[in-house]
Amino acid sequence: MLRSARFIVPWLLVVAAACGGGQNKSAEPAAPAAAPDAKKVDPATAGDISGKVLVEGQLPPNPPIKMGGDPACNNPNATAETYVASNGALENVFVYIKDGLGNKYLFETPAEPVKLDQKGCMYHPHVLGVRVGQPLRIVNSDQTMHNVHAMPQTNQEFNRSQAITGQKDDFTFTAPEVMIPFKCDVHGWMNAHVGVVTHPYFAVTGNGGTFDLRAVPAGTYTIEAWHEKLGAQTKTVTLGEKEKKEVVFTFKAPIAS
Amino acid sequence: MIWLHRYAKLVTLFTVLLIAAGGMVTSTSSGLSVPDWPNTYGWFMFSFPYSKWVGGIFYEHSHRLIASTVGFLTIGLAAWTSLVEPRRWVRRLAWLALGAVILQGVLGGLTVLYFLPAPISIGHAALAQIFFCLALSIAVFTSPRWACGANPVDDATLRRLTVATAGVIYVQILLGATMRHMDAGLAIPDFPLAFGRVVPPFWSTAIAINFAHRVGALAVTLAIAATAIRVWRHHRYRSGLVANATLLVVFLATQITLGAFVVLTGKQPIVNTAHVVNGASVLGTALVLALRSYRVRFARTAAAVEPARVLRSEPGGMGIPAVQGKAVRP
């Protein structure tokens, strides 16, 4: 048996060393490259697409969150943020140009990071967008420990510990993906959704359910509105030069079971 | 030798505790709450401050500490067995248990580092039961009852039945682990029917796994019923076997009840974990019954290492001898 152990133990060590964890994979998915004759959008001829996201029917109440598992997260009134709506206008909807831009345009990637904060053991904001290659800065503002676990389908999954208050970690995504769920496994109720796109034409509906996509070049586009529970809707919009178009999306509240 | 037996029982007990802790990790979705391994948030595992055991970290970190304890206990078991156990195959079994627990630790680490891929997580769950069976078997083989081995039951049908039963239970546990790690536990939301029918009206991978686990429960029920009836009808004066078979039926009834409550409570973590732990108890009880039914095959070996025993007849006039007094090492 000891002779067998002489082979088994080194084999296990080699396997463990060779595997080394899934957080440093080398092959990364890439965004489609711009065409050789791609150009910048001319702001003088660009138009705007704005609109509103509505919901019909009575939305179910967000369930209360029991934060008792961690004294640092003690908020007895906390609820999930699945449905945020007022006067029929739906918030936390990610709206973006899904199709129509092709690879005809060049867009500079902003160096300024987009912030995703962990405060009160909740993610702020709950839904957000970021560009391919743009840093996503995840901050721990809590007096407790979090793990930041992104679960993409196309991009690389990661799970990073944030043990220290004030800790900041920057992440970038290499391919477009709508949406990437984020969760904290320490605090099971914490979740956020990040949309990654190659262009600047995206927005998240806020108070009043409104959105604005500015400086959009003329063309025909598929606009998608995505909600974490109510799904996604698309609309086709043809935009002329310097034109302003309005789009309204209407979701239906789920039928009470 | 009695102390080695007690120590093996302690290892088995800790393994049950470890399975319970692992069940809580999965049931509370805490498997990735500690992203690093073998460290914990950068701390050396054993120096991670207790004040930071919050939320999912509590379940994952305590699972790691209990696993480490079982690992150390198993090193002790292998070493102790090598020193005092005269039977070579028992010594080998102890070293095999040590290899299994090391591999189990590596699988646990890999599943964290690779974000809980189903094949590794299922393998981790499957190996946990194998290790539990190894520890339990060593406890049985080092027990005084095994050592005396006087007039063991010799029933080929019972041997076949008990081995088949233990095998079916293990396959059922594998199905349960697959369902658990593929998040298919509530793919069929009602119980005992499936979407109001005996057979689901539509299928997906999750529904198929869930339904297979339910069919597996039926197979386990039939196997245990056949085994228990065999013992009750043909060996009713062997109190040890009867108690073992009865316990198996009790564990089965508990397991089916817990399985129903897992569905009806929407996978409440405590109920879920109790189902996992009780599943291991069903397997363990079936294994002990199988080992006892095979004891006769070990008679010659045991006679070579054990002293003669004083026998007496069972009350009831059936003339079935039993052991009197405790086993003593030569």
Image: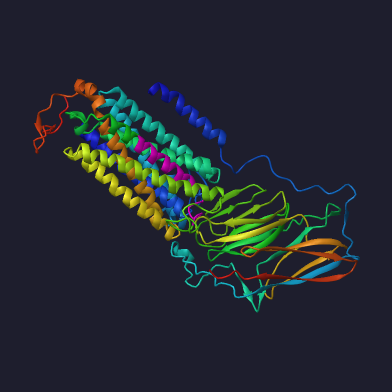
Q: Quadrant of residue B310?
A: top left
Q: Quadrant of residue A88?
A: bottom right
- Residue B170 position, x and y percent, is 40, 39
- Residue A225 position, x and y percent, is 71, 64
Q: Is residue B256 magenta?
A: no
Above or below, comparing residue B204 to residue B2 in the picture? below
Above or below, comparing residue B69 to residue A197 in the picture? above
Q: Is residue B274 left or right of residue B322?
A: right
Q: Residue at x 34, y 26 (%)?
A: B92
Query: Which contiguous range is marked in magenta?
Result: B164-188
Pick the front one: B194 or B18: B194
Q: Is residue B177 magenta?
A: yes
Above or below, comparing residue B291 to residue B261 in the picture? above
Pick the front one: A173 or B267: B267
Q: Is residue B90 left or right of residue A39?
A: left
Q: Is residue B218 visible?
A: yes
Q: Quadrant of the N terminus of chain A?
A: top left
- Residue B9 position, x and y percent, is 27, 39
Q: Residue at x 77, y 69 (%)?
A: A212
Q: Is residue A34 left or right of residue B326?
A: right
